[in-house]
Image (tube, rainbow, N blue to C red):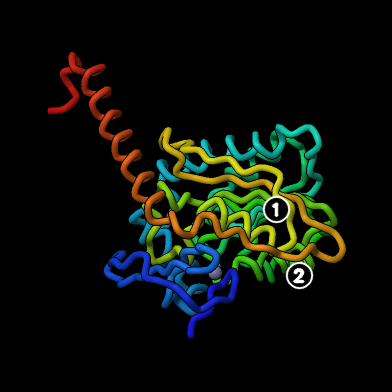
Amino acid sequence: MIECPLCGDTERSCFFRGVDHGINIQYWLCSTCGLVYQSPRMAQKQLAEFYASQYRTLLQGQAEPTPQALQTQNRRAAHLAQIVCGRSNVSPAYHLDIGCGGRALIAAIQEMSGCRSEGIEPDNAYRSYASSQGLTVYGSLDEWRRSAMGRPDLITMSHVLEHLVDPVGYLSSLRENILSPQAYLLVEVPNLYVHSSFEVAHNFAFASATLQAVVTKAGFRVLLLRKHGFPRALSPLYMTLLAQSLDGPLPEFGLRSSARCSTRVRRNLGRRLLNVERTLTKVITRVTHRDDPYLFK
Ligand SMILES: [Zn+2]
């Protein structure tokens, strides 16, 4: 029996079946906690090879960073840096960005806070690009630990958590073995209720309740959870969460079950609203550019 990676229960129902890049994928909805997770999925060894050399090519058609991907990363980074560094009580001294891509978030947080920042990027081409920009970037957390200059007081993970095999275990390990006491954690993930999100690389599709549950169970106190569409839409395609690590014994973990029954309904509604927004955007673009002879030909 397959156990839910969040609550451990085995009762579940099929939530989505489909094909992504020629690979059959299947997601399940946990009947107890409402977590949506992919099963079966790639083993850890397969995942390491996949992210080192295949993922970006699958995602964007080439291994090297594209101008469009870098532009999206830059705009997203500015937004995330503002969420962290815009808070008066958050002034990091040592920042680690896990899944740093082309280094955009490192640069944005360094610029706003002046802190020391390092990155971890498993993708070979993106790591080379980030290194060529003069930044210290490692291929894995183990590699970083061999050279670490202390304990970070801020870890950022933008569009990483949904790719992990065991998000609770990973975040718990960060809190216990990597982070300084009362360190900050910034996470951004696709929003299950709006984002298409089902793809071979995504082991999980989080809703706000399950995202908060994962972070809380790992020993963090949620400070902020913001749903937004930046930089792609007005509809809340994404969720950004800021949390702080707890010290000492953790409070007893309790699951909120309010979301699980309505998960399908909420996703259908969110996806429909996104389609309405996209249709309206096309109509408005056509109307506002109707006299432009170079468009829509
Ligand atoms: Zn569960």
Q: Is residue 44 visible?
A: no
Assign a secondary structure to mark 1: strand
Does label 1 or label 2 sit earlier along the sequence? 2
From this viewpoint, which residue is outermost toward the top?
A: 291
Tag 2: Cα neighbours inside 10 Å, few (<14), some, or many (≥20)?
A: few
Where is mark 1, residue-wise? 155
Q: Position of residue 190 (x, y in %)?
A: 48, 51
From this viewpoint, which residue is outermost toward the bottom?
A: 1
* Quadrant assignment for ligand 1: bottom right
| Disc 1 residue type (three-letter) | Ile
Assign a secondary structure to mark 2: helix
Image position of 254 (left or right of 259): right
Query: Which circle marks residue 146 in the picture?
Result: 2
- Name which residue lies at 74% across and 34% down: 87
- Name which residue lies at 45% across and 76% down: 42
| Disc 2 residue type (three-letter) | Arg
- Name which residue lies at 29% across and 66% down: 18
Q: Position of residue 157 (x, y in %)?
A: 61, 53
- Name which residue lies at 85% across and 56% down: 181
C-alpha distance separating marks 1 and 2: 17 Å
Number of numbered discs visible in the structure rendering? 2
